[in-house]
Amino acid sequence: MEPGKWAIQVATDSTLRSVLAEELRELVQAKISERPYGAELAATPKEAYRIVLNSRIAGHVYRVLQQGMARDAAGLYRVVSAVDWTAQFPVDATFAVSFTGGNKAIRNTLFGAQCVKDAIVDRFVARLGRRPSVNVESPDVLVHLHLTQKNLATVSVELSAGSLHRRGYRLEGGLAPLRENLAAAVLRRAQWPQVAAERGAFVDPMCGSGTLVIEAALMIRGLDVDQKRQRLGSPRWFGHDWQALEQVMAESALAAIEVPLVGMDIDPYQIEQARENAKRAGVADYVTFMVRDVRKPGRPSVLESAEKGLLVVNLPYGQRVSEQAALPALYEKAASNWLAAYQGWSAALLGPNDPVMRYLGLRAEKRFDFANGPLAVQLWRLRLDDKARPAPRGPDEFATRLIERAATMERSDSAQAFANRLKKNLRHLGRWSRREGVSCYRVYDADLPEYALAVDIYTDINGQRWINVQEYAAPSQIDPKLARQRLTEAMGVIAELLEVPTGKVFLRIRRRQRGSNQYQKLGQKHQYVKVREGAATLLVNFTDYLDTGLFLDHRLVRAKVAQLAKGGDLLNLFCYTGTASVLAACEGARSTTSVDMSGTYLNWAARNFRENGFDIGHAHQLIRADCLQWLKQATSQKKRYDVIFLDPPTFSSSKRMQGTLDIQRDHKSLIRQAMALLKASGVLIFSTNLRRFKLDPTLKADYVCNDLSLSTLPQDFSRNQRIRQVFEFKHAE
């Protein structure tokens, strides 16, 4: 060690090491070496005190006294005894020992601390015949020992008064506590010092107990003399350089705060806590706290004139403030409000992890990984402007990007196995489709577990081939990088074997859809392709929606409904794009009545009718309504139907519905209400894609019921005979 310098170790949370190193390089001129626990350096006493008094990221600051190898308790005793403790502090001073780490022989930190204490006491007794007292609450000197797995023991005196993340202003943490030094690290990564230097404002719209706002104020204002003195530890250590300490104390005065700093929260109790914390921190006159719902648009009046600034927020994680199910809507609404209210501002958003953060619908310029206690969290840094909204990538762009990437990759053995299976299926199903006159069919359906894809071929009326690929979302235990690599390889194989240009290959990731998500729009290209099924021309769309508008697994069900409805009246409930109704009209149905809740799909159905020469009117009606409510009202009318096609979703909770639809729970009443509209000689076809569906046995007792699941299963879906269930109902004679 150079003369006049101390060996200093600065400990902090492992995810804050790089931020700590950046801060230390601003505070001192010494060489900073990052370590797993934080950083180490050779510092003058003035530099050491500057770290203790000014660091916002450090946890503990130690002055190293001795290092040595300690394989067991005896070795640890020898290393600690090598220090002349009577030269470190007076015998009438109190002391305490903190112990971290461990090795094979010493695993218990309490045992390790006891060994250190015994060595110190024995050294005093041997030299002076007296021993100092232990005071774990407020010791005059705090001794620290860290033991590594490789048996290196480091004996230190702690220069900081316990962990520096405890600033002393926060008596209660609130509902979602954020450690003070983590808050400071977030502010540094958010570039708050630079924003403040440019007179930018600060706002935390979900401030809780105010930690981020208070740390932002302290970061630009500094600490007063009393606050700094409270950070100094081991006051009766003989090694202190009091002159150096006073020089550091005098180095900087408190800076004026000339920018608005605002914290908002929906909880009045949290806001009251924040105000009390600000008083204890000495910044109550410089910060503003108010009760405000993050979902409320606009910005508070105190920020109206601020043209630039920084928005920082510790988002709710789901585990502690709200349920996970509520996060998507909250994140989406908040992000939209912030984009509108704080255009041009910088932002830093701290949240649980990448998948959850994607609910914001924003694009980060940089991301940083942190840990908030046991929780892994991410910080997204961005600007709140038009570029923050990522350009939507449609199914065609998604597919093209992966196909182009696959062209640069060497095909793996597993990808070759996928290619062999796809080639075999294409040869077999190709012959079948030509023989049966089927232009749209599934050529691969998760045949290999490593490639959980559905690959559908659509041939339009001009003979052009289009490919729709759906990937079933991989389980959480699958490595995301491996899953993406397999998907990329598969897309390259599909484009090559099916000989389709990239602009006609589309890719979607299939996840469970509920409620309004079933009608989610992916794009606005309005590109419709005409295909043939039976006697009908139907419109499909590969770019704008979650589904193409034509469920291929229902091909034989639609054909049966159309044949049954020839010369009769068809009621098509939950009609989607009206394909079954159009096929029935083409086969000679006297009338069709199609009911659905979605205006988008009914407009699509109308186009399908017009494409086949049918006008929407008396013979062919499209009704926008909640099918559950419509059925209740229709039973009082005289209209009865020869054929009813009932193909409801598995679950629905749209805002336009009264209540929810759960097909397992509700199918009994749904079928009974529909049967009340069926003529005595009529037929009702019920279909569901709920794979674990169980038909209520009373329905079989009250009606003539036939299971058509296998007889209506197309050959291209024969790998999975439980993909959907179909039942035929008739009135008992």
Image (spheres, helix red, strand yellow):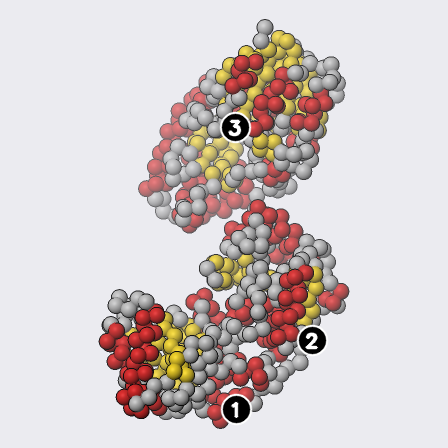
Q: Mark 1 or mark 3, which is nearer the start of the sequence?
A: 1
Q: Mark 2 or mark 1, which is nearer the start of the sequence?
A: 1
The one nearer the camera, 376 or 338, is 376
Is 306 above or below relative to 24? Answer: above
Which residue is under mark 3?
689
Which residue is under mark 1?
246
Which residue is under mark 2?
285
Is 680 above or below relative to 697? Answer: above
Amino acid carrying mark 1 in the image = Glu
User: How many numbered tags mark residues here?
Assistant: 3
Q: In this view, does 714 lie to the left or right of 588?
A: left
Is 555 above or below relative to 454? Answer: above
The answer for how far apart the CA atoms under marks 2 and 3 are is 62 Å
At 62% from the left and 71% from the top, the residue drawn is 277
The answer for how far apart the CA atoms under marks 1 and 2 are is 28 Å
Q: Where is residue 192, by image quadrant?
A: bottom right
**Label 2 residue SS:** loop
Disc marking residue 209? none
At 27% from the left and 72% from the top, the residue drawn is 151
At 63% from the left and 38% from the top, the residue drawn is 516
In this view of the protein, can residue 199 be seen by the observer?
no
The answer for how far apart the CA atoms under marks 3 and 1 are is 77 Å
